[in-house]
Image: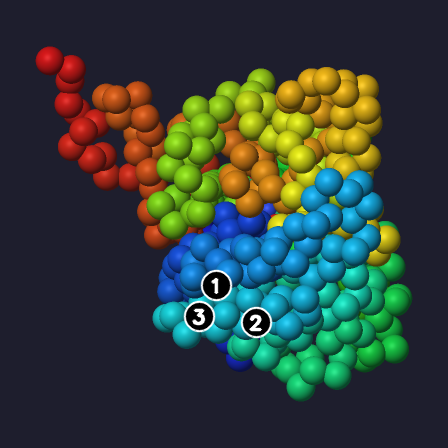
């Protein structure tokens, strides 16, 4: 029988949802608009807590980045960035603004979660993470997905928040070991995660694997985790992610006991996605050979991206006085070291190139690091190529419904716009 995703439901207590979750995509690639569409359609959407102060400046007309830069301008030529600290009050205000505005706009029976990355260490890892988690809860987010990092202490950071036991809290893992570690570290809290996203090696963004990612397979990791949880009598919804491209791919996981699926790449070419229109066309156009997994992210995790991303090889001055989200607890970032090394090697050069690392904050902020999922090269098959050579943008609703209702490994194309049929004179 050809089943559809719509034949399944995700259950959170009494609430029933369409088992489709759109994953978090920072920096503001999974926008509030995209997350709100998922919620309106009865599923789950994510906003991201990556670089929220700059997102807030762009969306809500605040001046957080300008104020930080003004305070630390004196330090721009200094290689030591340890003095560049975030103002916790400003992070709180930006998070509150982003989350509360999004939640006020929520319609429909679905949910909006926030993707919170541990690797955003912000020159004060514990303090800044605590503020981000607390403010998201206080501002009414439906749930928090702990991402990019091990998050061994994150539940403890939220323990004293009044919503700690009622908000939906989940974690992303890429191995059974990471899950076991998380559960062991948090055993004393008597509070299990409400869901576990199991992210395989074909996902976009940072990968929870080494450069040997191709040796791993999502279905195998999910089965391993499932078997262990069942032996431990743990009943927590499992949500596979990474490379689930069609409704039928999703059904295969749901039939094997997954509670829902998390998807992202298909939505990078939706109107509601935050990438600029010309970048969405790059995603549409990409072939398999145009995509790579590399190690230029200063986080230390491999990252998948389009090879023609302007971030690759860029030698811009580190932007820590404005951003600084990847500064570790001592104010270090591996891009700063790589940049300083190249400057020392080429003292007279006007412009340098840095190949081994990138200034991820500045480039993600400016949509110059085109991170993407493995199957990005299949996006061209999900839309129409127009007479002008561009691809027709899709609505998030169209993609969501395609996941929900398609079967037989098919992808529904959108209604063609008139331009599709126009011929050059
Ligand atoms: C453009 C892009 C940006 C992403 N950024 C993040 C992120 O900031 N945090 C995160 O946890 N996952 C991130 N991801 C991973 C997704 O949330 C999701 O788990 C994964 O991509 C699902 O696989 P799929 O893209 O093959 O559907 C990103 C994915 C993409 C495509």
Q: Earlier in the sequence, mark 1 or mark 2?
A: 1
Q: With respect to residue 297, does 387 lie above or below?
A: above
Q: Which residue is drawn at 43% across and 63% down?
A: 60
SS at mark 1 in the image: loop
Q: Which residue is drawn at 50% across and 48% down?
A: 29
Q: Nearer the viewer, residue 137 or 366?
A: 366
Q: Mark 3 packing: few (<14 Cα in 10 Å), some, or many (20+)?
A: some
Q: Which of marks 1 and 3 is nearer the N terminus?
A: 1
Q: Earlier in the sequence, mark 3 or mark 2?
A: 2
What's the CA distance linking mark 1 and mark 3?
A: 14 Å
Q: In which quarter of the image is the C terminus?
A: top left
Q: With respect to residue 279, does 93 lie above or below?
A: below
Q: With respect to residue 163, does 251 lie above or below?
A: above
Q: Which residue carries the number 3 mark?
A: 101
Q: Which residue is drawn at 58% across and 18% down?
A: 289
Query: Which percent across, then down, holds residue 384?
Result: 30, 29
Q: Which of 356 and 287 is in front in this view?
A: 356
- Find out whether the residues at labels 1 and 2 contact each other: C-beta distance under 8 Å: yes
Q: In this view, does 397 lie to the left or right of 227?
A: left
Q: Which of 18 and 322 is in front in this view?
A: 322
SS at mark 3 in the image: helix
Using the rendered view, name the quadrant where residue 418 is placed.
Answer: top left
Viewer can see residue 189 = yes
**Viewer-nearest of labels 1 and 3?**
1
Label placed on residue 93: 2
């Amino acid at each position: 029988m050809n089943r559809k995703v719509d034949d399944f439901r995700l259950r959170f207590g009494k609430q029933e949802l369409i088992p489709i979750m759109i994953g978090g995509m920072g920096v503001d690639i999974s926008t509030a608009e995209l997350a709100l569409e998922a919620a309106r359609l009865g599923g789950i959407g994510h906003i991201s807590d990556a670089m929220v102060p700059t997102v807030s400046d762009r969306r809500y007309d605040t001046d957080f980045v300008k104020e930080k830069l003004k305070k630390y301008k004196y330090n721009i030529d200094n290689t030591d960035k340890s003095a560049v600290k975030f103002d916790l009050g400003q992070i709180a205000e930006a998070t509150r603004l982003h989350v509360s505005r999004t939640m006020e706009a929520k319609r429909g029976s679905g949910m909006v979660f926030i993707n919170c990355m541990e690797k955003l260490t912000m020159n004060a890892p514990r303090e800044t993470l605590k503020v981000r988690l607390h403010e998201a809860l206080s501002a009414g987010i439906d749930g928090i997905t702990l991402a990019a990092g091990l998050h061994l202490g994150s539940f403890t950071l939220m323990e004293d928040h009044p919503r700690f036991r009622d908000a939906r809290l989940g974690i992303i893992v890429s191995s059974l070991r990471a899950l076991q570690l998380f559960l062991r570290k948090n055993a004393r809290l008597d509070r299990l995660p409400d869901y576990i996203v199991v992210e395989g090696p074909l996902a976009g963004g940072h990968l929870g694997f080494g450069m040997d990612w191709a040796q791993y397979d999502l279905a195998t990791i999910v089965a391993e985790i499932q078997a262990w949880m069942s032996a431990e009598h743990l009943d927590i919804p499992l949500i596979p992610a990474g490379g689930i491209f069609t409704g039928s791919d999703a059904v295969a996981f749901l039939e094997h006991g997954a509670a829902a699926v998390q998807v992202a790449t298909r939505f990078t070419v939706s109107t509601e996605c935050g990438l600029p229109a010309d970048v969405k066309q790059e995603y549409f156009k990409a072939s398999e050979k145009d995509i790579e997994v590399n190690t230029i992210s200063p986080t230390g995790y491999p990252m998948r991206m389009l090879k023609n991303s302007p971030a690759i090889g860029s030698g811009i001055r580190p932007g820590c006085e404005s951003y600084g989200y990847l500064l570790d607890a001592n104010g270090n970032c591996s891009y700063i070291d790589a940049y300083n090394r190249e400057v020392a090697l080429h003292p007279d050069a006007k412009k340098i190139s840095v190949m081994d690392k990138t200034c991820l904050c500045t480039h993600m902020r400016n949509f110059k690091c085109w991170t993407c999922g493995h199957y990005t090269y299949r996006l061209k098959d999900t839309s129409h190529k127009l007479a002008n050579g561009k691809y027709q943008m899709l609505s998030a609703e169209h993609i969501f419904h395609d996941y929900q209702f398609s079967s037989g490994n098919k992808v529904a194309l959108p209604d063609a716009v008139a331009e599709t049929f126009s011929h050059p004179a």
